[in-house]
Amino acid sequence: MYYTMLDYYLNLFDSNKREFAFEATTRADYDAWKQALRARLQDITGLNRCVPCQGEHELISTENVEGFEAEYHTLETEPGVVMPFYLIRPDAALEGKRPALIIPHGHGGGKRAVLAHQGQFIREALAEGFIVACPDERGSGDRREFPEQGDAPEQARMNSHRELTQLGINFGRTVIGGAVWDLMRLADWLLAQPEADGFLACAGMSGGGQQTLWFAALDDRVSAAITSGYFYGVRDSLIELPQNCACNFVPHFFETADMGELGALIAPRPFFVESGENDPLSGKRRVQNVVEQLDVTRAAYRLFGAEDKVVHSVHDGGHEWRGNGMREFLREARGMK
Ligand SMILES: [Zn+2]
């Protein structure tokens, strides 16, 4: 016999409404709601506790990584906090200003894993003229803490999210808050490049989809967002699956909002959600748990007459990135149809 707590937390979730559940019916209501929810999210993620810095930048080397000519850069994001990222440039023959694309990685490797597993998507983006940046999240890749460091394949897949969550929570910080801050600083840098045309897309799978979702929700400079394998109601996916990585959990979030509200904060910017029919991380009701949240998101887009800017692409696989329709989505988002 086990006397457990899961039902207690499910009941706690069910018996209380989210404080910022989306209910706006006018644009004015939406604007006020967005401002208030953003302030709350900046607080509970610790984003507003991150410390600005000079943003020292260095180009370290150029390497051949998974067939790409990848520039290895470092960027200081807080005093003493350094984020490495790969930068891959489109064909030099393409003329004019360029859009930028950030691809944050998921669990199971850092920036290098993006080049290995999303190479086709990167090639499509380069062909569309995008400058592509793939950063390491705090605690992953070349930012792993000492217990997870090492070059063996099983070590390269490890991350320090548990350690960083445990350390951060005592300072009011979270892994996702730090990740969003770092993506914001990468956006500062990318958008300041002389060839940047001001269009910034962000696309990610799984933990990269999580970073993309939160980043786009909290920063209007993200012109278009693609999230794969990470958009679902928290009840089925995080409360009933509490063994998920510690980085998924934010103090008070289950009292504040659900994923549909994070999507609603992105309105009316183009937003693409990819789901696998058999993705266990969507919870036991699978895609239904995605559709319900997207309905909340769409209600916000409707206020802008922009419901067509939300795309839901469902494939027959599991927790995996397929990329179907993303190139067309990015073209359309840029008005290049
Ligand atoms: Zn994690």
Image (cartoon, rainbow, N blue to C red):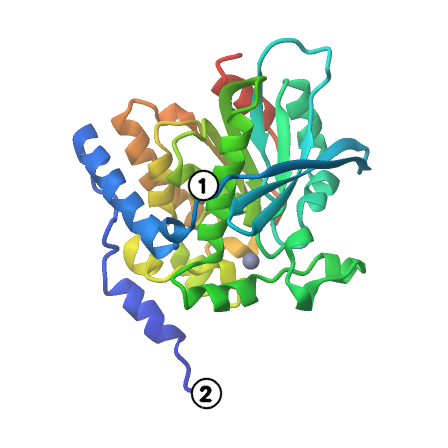
**Spot occupied by residue 285 in the image (x, y as percentages of width and height):** 46, 55
Image quarter for ligand 1 equals bottom right
**Spot occupied by residue 66 in the image (x, y as percentages of width and height):** 80, 38
Q: Is residue 95 visible?
A: yes
Q: Is residue 318 above or below residue 203?
A: below
**Spot occupied by residue 282 in the image (x, y as percentages of width and height):** 50, 53
At label 2, counting other C-alpha atoms closer than 10 Å, the crowd grade (few under 14, some 14-19, many 20 or more) is few
Name the residue carrying label 1.
Answer: 215
Residue at 53% in and 24% down: 329
**Spot occupied by residue 90 in the image (x, y as percentages of width and height):** 69, 21
Asked whether mark 1 lies closer than 8 Å to ligand 1, one says no
Name the one closer to the observer, 171 or 251: 171
At label 1, counting other C-alpha atoms closer than 10 Å, the crowd grade (few under 14, some 14-19, many 20 or more) is many
**Three-letter amino acid code at disc 1?**
Phe
Asked whether mark 2 lies closer than 8 Å to ligand 1, one says no
Residues under labels 1 and 2: Cα distance?
A: 40 Å
